[in-house]
């Protein structure tokens, strides 16, 4: 049988595209290299806890259409992300808010906090040219040194002076006692895990797992009129113009026979010396209870180690600096000549997308196809 669309990758982008095309009456085949659907939002149940196997994913969006869309496939709980930063045993509230400023400087009023930040940001004059300058101009040097520098350099493996400013603008700065990490109207975790949500999106759609498209390209290309490719764009072209850089992440998962390890879903280790960037305690995404509402006596934690991607590793984060932006531009020129193929998603578009942006991008792409 030939399909209208072959979709390479059963992550969020692929699953949303598949669902939309199927509902528009097209025939769709989805394939994935891994043995499971969900891509990097894949969750696996361990001791009744939905473990985020490829790193913590907290769904948040300001886009009502996207929020309503995901709610068709899962019920969302009321989880609100408020990570704690651990700097050499000193604990700070994240994102940067009045609790953080109080702990850092002893200030209690927004005016005092603002005055402190203003005094410290003066060292930056003109438009910030990199992440370091951007961070200091947002929150001052003290917070930069204790809560940003070490974490960022571990996460990206690069000096903060060599990173683009936009990365730190992801984090809100607030002069209120509000430690919700995201400035989003809607937020939560899908009850039952992300895997179930993605499986619901793919319900009734032909899906083949453990298939490496790049190794069986001719065979699979012959099965469909068009291809939607959500893997890494440089891999698609056999890296012929050179490698795009990615950051990869390694997780050390541990199941512990205690009910509470760190009292919060995410603790960031913001010093340079601790080798991991953060520890996730997955049960707190679901308030420590299983789906029947019972307290879970064990806990599962993941230490997260960031590393430079090399061939064979899983790519997680595109490194959106100048060199890579240029190279990606050249790959885009090659992509434009592939009339049968549409490139999409975090890897296909080489963008530091959040989940809601991935979904919005897939919805737009499929709407344009119709
Ligand atoms: N960041 C930081 N300290 C923290 C958390 C984040 O300096 O405790 C910076 C860091 O540069 C990171 C960026 O903020 O790359 C974006 O963080 P976010 O939590 O959005 O990253 P993600 O959850 O996508 O890994």
Image (tube, rainbow, N blue to C red):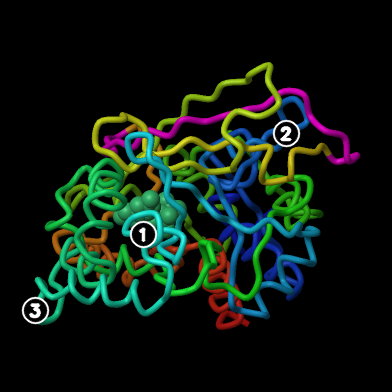
Neighbours of disc 2 within 10 Å: few (<14), some (14-19), many (20+)? many
Q: Position of residue 275 (x, y in %)?
A: 31, 29
Q: Quadrant of ligand 1?
A: bottom left
Q: Quadrant of residue 44?
A: top right
Counting residues from the N terminus, which is met first, the one under dot 1 or under dot 3?
Answer: 1
Horizontal arrangement in the rendering, residue 181 relative to residue 70 (left or right): left
Whether 307 is drawn above or below 64: the answer is above
* Residue 339 in sight here: yes
Residue sitting at x 74%, y 38%? 288
Residue tagged by mark 2? Answer: 49
CA gap, disc 2 and disc 3: 48 Å
Q: Which residue is mark 1?
A: 106
In this rendering, position of residue 275 left or right of residue 185: left
C-alpha gap between disc 1 and disc 3: 27 Å
In front: label 1 or label 3: 1
In the picture as drawn, the residue positioned furthest to the top comes out as 257
Report if residue 294 lies within the magenta region: yes
Taking 20 as reference, is 79 above or below it? above
Specify the segment rendered in magenta: 291-311
- Callout in the foreground (2, 1): 1
Figure check: 168 above or below 199 = below
Q: Give left or right: position of 14 versus 350.
A: right
Residue at 46% x, 30% y: name it. 303
Q: Quadrant of the C terminus?
A: bottom right
| Left or right of 267 on screen, residue 159 | left
Find out whether residue 141 is within the magenta segment. no
For marks 2 and 3 on the same chain, the one whose residue lies earlier in the sequence: 2
Q: Please state the horizontal and vertical placement of residue 27, each as a whole percent of the image.
A: 71, 63
Residue 25 x/y as whole percent: 76, 73
> Looking at mark 2, is its residue's CB closer than 8 Å to ligand 1?
no
Would you call the spot at circle 3 few (<14 residues within 10 Å), some (14-19), or many (20 or more)?
A: few
Q: Which mark is residue 125?
A: 3
């Amino acid at each position: 049988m030939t399909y209208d669309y072959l979709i390479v990758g059963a992550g969020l982008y692929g699953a949303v595209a598949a669902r939309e095309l199927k509902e528009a009456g097209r025939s769709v085949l989805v394939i994935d290299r891994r043995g499971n659907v969900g891509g990097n939002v894949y969750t696996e149940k361990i001791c009744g806890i939905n473990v985020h196997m490829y790193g913590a994913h907290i769904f948040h969006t300001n886009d009502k259409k996207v929020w309503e869309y995901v709610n068709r496939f899962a019920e969302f709980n009321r989880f609100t992300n408020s990570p704690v930063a651990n700097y050499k045993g000193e604990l700070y509230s994240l994102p940067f808010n009045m609790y953080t400023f109080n702990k850092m400087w002893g200030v209690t009023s927004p005016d005092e906090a603002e005055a402190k930040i203003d005094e410290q940001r003066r060292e930056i004059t003109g438009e910030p040219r990199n992440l370091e300058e951007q961070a200091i101009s947002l929150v001052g040097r003290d917070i930069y040194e204790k809560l940003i520098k070490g974490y960022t350099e571990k996460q990206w493996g690069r000096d903060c002076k060599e990173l683009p400013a936009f990365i730190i603008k992801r984090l809100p700065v607030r002069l209120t006692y509000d430690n919700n990490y995201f400035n989003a109207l809607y937020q939560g975790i899908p009850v039952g895990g992300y895997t179930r949500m993605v499986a619901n999106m793919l319900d009734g759609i032909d899906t083949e797992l453990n298939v490496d498209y790049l190794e069986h390209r001719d065979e699979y290309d012959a099965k469909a009129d068009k291809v939607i490719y959500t893997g890494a764009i440089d891999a698609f072209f056999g890296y012929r113009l050179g490698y795009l850089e990615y950051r990869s992440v390694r997780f050390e998962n541990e199941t512990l026979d205690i009910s509470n390890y760190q009292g919060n879903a995410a603790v960031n280790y913001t010093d340079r010396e601790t080798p991991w960037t953060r520890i996730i305690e997955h049960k707190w995404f679901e308030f420590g209870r299983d789906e029947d509402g019972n307290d879970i006596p064990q806990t599962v934690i993941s230490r997260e180690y960031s590393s430079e991607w090399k061939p064979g590793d899983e790519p997680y984060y595109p490194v959106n600096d100048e060199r890579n932006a240029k190279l990606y531009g050249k790959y885009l020129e090659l992509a434009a000549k592939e009339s049968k193929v549409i490139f999409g998603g975090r890897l296909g578009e080489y963008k530091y997308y959040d989940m809601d942006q991935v979904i919005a991008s897939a919805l737009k792409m499929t709407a344009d196809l119709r």
